[in-house]
């Protein structure tokens, strides 16, 4: 690889990503409750997060080492491999908390639904890059069909959150590319019908209950409303400056559920307060802005769409998770990038950033 390419790296993106990762590792250390009882199984989460982060850095460097245009040729084979993994998951998957989402490889477990997000982004970028104009009905349905097979396999796990993420990423990429006005208007009219179908047919009873709890959290404080209630208490008790590192009572005394994953930012809010949360959100804004600027500066349509897909991947996770933690969005089980614990998700996050940096490094190249 030409070492001169490193001079074109998007340093603002790289620095903001590393800061987010370090903040997430420190937050997991605190959420582990090591100050009170280091023997708890939670105490190893931050250590494993560091290991996964190192693996992710390796994947990021590997993705940066070759011309990103080669990914276009790998899009279909990679997509088919991911579909095979999702099919295998339905037969031999590892069930945790009533969901069959993890595929055991003996020495480790992977979550194929996380890899499916990358597969959809790559294939969508390849297909849309070959469309010179805004999408009409035919091209719109062709592109939409990409998500049908992985979404069906992910819904039956069940994992509505990941299914929603894939559809939101795909929608964002289609709008970024361009959609005929009449297609967009009819889709908006059709949206209430799709929502009704999901409510009566596509959702399990516990998923409907989450939405009802969101509308009235006090209706079942010891059941479905417990998560959001404890999350609000944790964030609110942080007040302006927070209680201090490892001093959050809601997390240290085990009142806050899923404090290492879905509600990790509630731990951060309790310990660092409003000022800390504001600083974290500003850092995320710089992070997203650095990705979006790369999408606009890319020298070819495939690179631009690829980075746009990564932008929507991160944007929707950040927006939904933070909204969920403070009670503005129903609980859907979507982690916060670099802050929440997750091996497959962490490696994928670094890989996604590697693709963005790859496009950024080659934005001044002349393509033949």
Image (cartoon, rainbow, N blue to C red):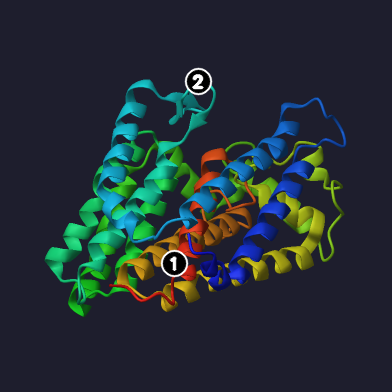
Among numbered discs 2 and 1, the one appearing first in the sequence: 2
Q: Is residue 200 above or below residue 21?
A: above
Residue at 37% from the left image edge and 70% from the top image edge? 304
Query: Can you give x and y, in whole percent of width and height, for residue 170 in the image?
Result: 33, 59
Q: Could you say which is closer to the camera, residue 68 or residue 281?
A: 68
Q: For residue 195, which numbered disc appears in the image?
A: none
**Relative to 65, is 241 on the left or the right?**
right
Query: Can you give x and y, in whole percent of width and height, for residue 24 in the image?
Result: 69, 51
Q: For residue 359, which numbered disc appears in the image?
A: 1
Query: Can you give x and y, in whole percent of width and height, for residue 325 in the image?
Result: 62, 54
**Relative to 217, is 270 on the left or the right?**
right
**Relative to 121, is 318 on the left or the right?**
right
Disc 2 marks which residue? 106
Number of residues whose C-alpha sits closer than 10 Å to that of mark 1, classed few (under 14), some (14–19) or many (20 or more): many
Q: Disc 2, disc 1: CB below 8 Å?
A: no
Query: Can you give x and y, in whole percent of width and height, for residue 48 in the image?
Result: 66, 36
> Callout 1: helix, strand or loop?
helix
Residue at 52% from the left image edge and 58% from the top image edge? 353
Q: Is residue 299 visible?
A: yes
Residue at 14% from the left image edge and 67% from the top image edge? 137
Number of residues whose C-alpha sits closer than 10 Å to that of mark 2, classed few (under 14), some (14–19) or many (20 or more): few
Disc 2/disc 1 C-alpha distance (Å): 35 Å
């Amino acid at each position: 690889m030409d070492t001169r390419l490193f001079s074109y790296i998007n340093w603002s993106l790289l620095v903001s990503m590393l800061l987010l990762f370090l903040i997430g590792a420190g937050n997991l250390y605190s959420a582990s409750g090591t100050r009170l009882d280091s023997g708890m199984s939670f105490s190893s989460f931050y250590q494993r997060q560091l290991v996964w982060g190192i693996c992710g850095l390796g994947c990021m460097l590997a993705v940066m080492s070759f011309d990103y245009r080669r990914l276009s040729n790998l899009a279909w084979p990679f997509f088919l491999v991911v579909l095979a993994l999702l099919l295998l998951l339905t037969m031999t998957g590892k069930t945790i908390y009533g969901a069959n989402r993890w595929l055991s490889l003996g020495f480790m477990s992977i979550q194929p639904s996380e890899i499916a997000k990358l597969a959809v982004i790559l294939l969508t970028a390849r297909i849309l890059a070959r469309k010179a104009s805004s999408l009409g009905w035919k091209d719109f349905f062709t592109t939409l069909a990409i998500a049908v097979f992985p979404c069906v396999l992910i819904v039956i796990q069940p994992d509505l959150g990941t299914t929603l993420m894939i559809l939101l990423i795909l929608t964002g990429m289609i709008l970024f590319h361009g959609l005929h006005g009449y297609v967009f208007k009819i889709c908006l009219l059709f949206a209430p019908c799709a929502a009704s179908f999901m409510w009566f047919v596509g959702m399990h009873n516990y998923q409907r209950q989450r939405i009802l709890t969101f509308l009235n959290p006090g209706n079942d404080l010891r059941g479905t409303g417990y998560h959001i209630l404890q999350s609000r208490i944790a964030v609110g008790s942080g007040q302006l400056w927070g209680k201090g590192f490892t001093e959050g009572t809601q997390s240290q005394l085990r009142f806050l559920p899923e404090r290492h994953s879905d509600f990790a930012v509630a731990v951060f809010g309790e310990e660092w307060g409003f000022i800390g949360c504001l600083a974290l959100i500003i850092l995320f804004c710089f992070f997203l802005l650095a990705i979006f600027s790369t999408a606009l500066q890319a020298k070819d349509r495939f690179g631009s769409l690829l980075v746009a897909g990564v932008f929507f991947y991160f944007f929707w996770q950040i927006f939904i998770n933070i909204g969920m933690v403070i009670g503005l969005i129903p609980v859907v089980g979507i982690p916060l990038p670099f802050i929440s614990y997750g091996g497959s998700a962490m490696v994928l996050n670094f890989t996604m950033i590697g693709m963005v940096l790859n496009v950024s490094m080659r934005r001044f190249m002349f393509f033949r």
